Amino acid sequence: MNDVASDTLQAALARHGIDLPDDEVELLDRYCRALWSWNEKLNLTRHTDYEKFVSRDVVDCLQLERLLDAGDRVLDLGTGGGVPGVVLAIVRPDLEVTLCDSVAKKAKAAAAIVEQTGLTVPVKVHHAPAQEVLEREQFDAVVVRAVAPLVKLLRWVRPCWDAFERLLVIKGPAWTEERKVAREAGLLKGLQLRKVASYPLPGTESESVVLSIRRAE
């Protein structure tokens, strides 16, 4: 097991077979430091060492970025400390990333973290519920991780499908039960839900998935 105190981001990436350009690793490292500093004031993340950051946050974001097209406009709903939005902006600078959080303190922290990271591309941060942002702007994809059960997410975005193409949601092994609850509530009517990625959840026998939800054709 690695010594947490002496670990580096580059070493943690290598342990997981992840090879990123040096400039992206540097930005991710700056992001980590800014996030962890703000985390001492607010509860933004439980992933406060490089191993957890890579095995959970980076792995999740790399699964997402493979599903996004060049130049996609992406909204990170309920961004908290900036995952997945900030990480996506680092590893995919071609994307137009917007972050939103309805909690003022978290939105303020996210904006500060973006500034302290020194991203090479602009990232907008809104203190507002996703519904308000979707009333004003258009997106290709809305990305969500660790925000709410599917039934709540689908209720939130139900009036807003004209504003975006698809919802990409990272979920754990309970996703099938969440899908059942959403279906029984009638919230999947007129929608197409597909599991578009599945991968091991580190340290467990379970898996994480990415669900793609869009209007049925």
Image: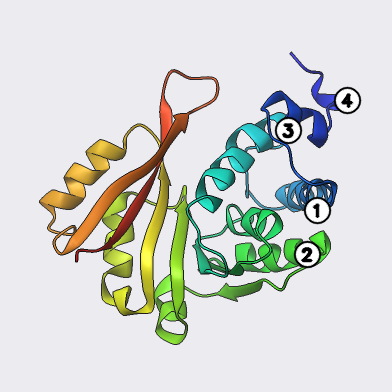
Query: In the image, is 123 to the left or to the right of 201?
Result: right
User: x, y (%) of residue 123?
Assistant: 67, 71
> In percent of the image, x 63 and y 65: which residue is there?
105
Q: Which residue position is annotated with label 3?
A: 13
Q: Which residue position is annotated with label 1?
A: 27
Along the line of sight, the residue nearer the viewer: 183 or 138: 138
**Circle 2 residues within 10 Å: few <14, some 14–19, many ≥20:** some
Q: Quadrant of residue 120?
A: bottom right
Query: In the image, is 162 to the left or to the right of 90?
Result: left
> In percent of the image, x 62 and y 44: which residue is there?
45
- Where, quadrant-wise, is the N terminus in this rendering? top right
Q: Which residue position is annotated with label 4?
A: 6
Query: In the image, is 207 to the left or to the right of 128?
Result: left
How far apart marks 4 and 1 lie (CA) works out to: 19 Å
* SS category of the residue bearing label 3: helix
Tell me which amino acid carries mark 1. Leu
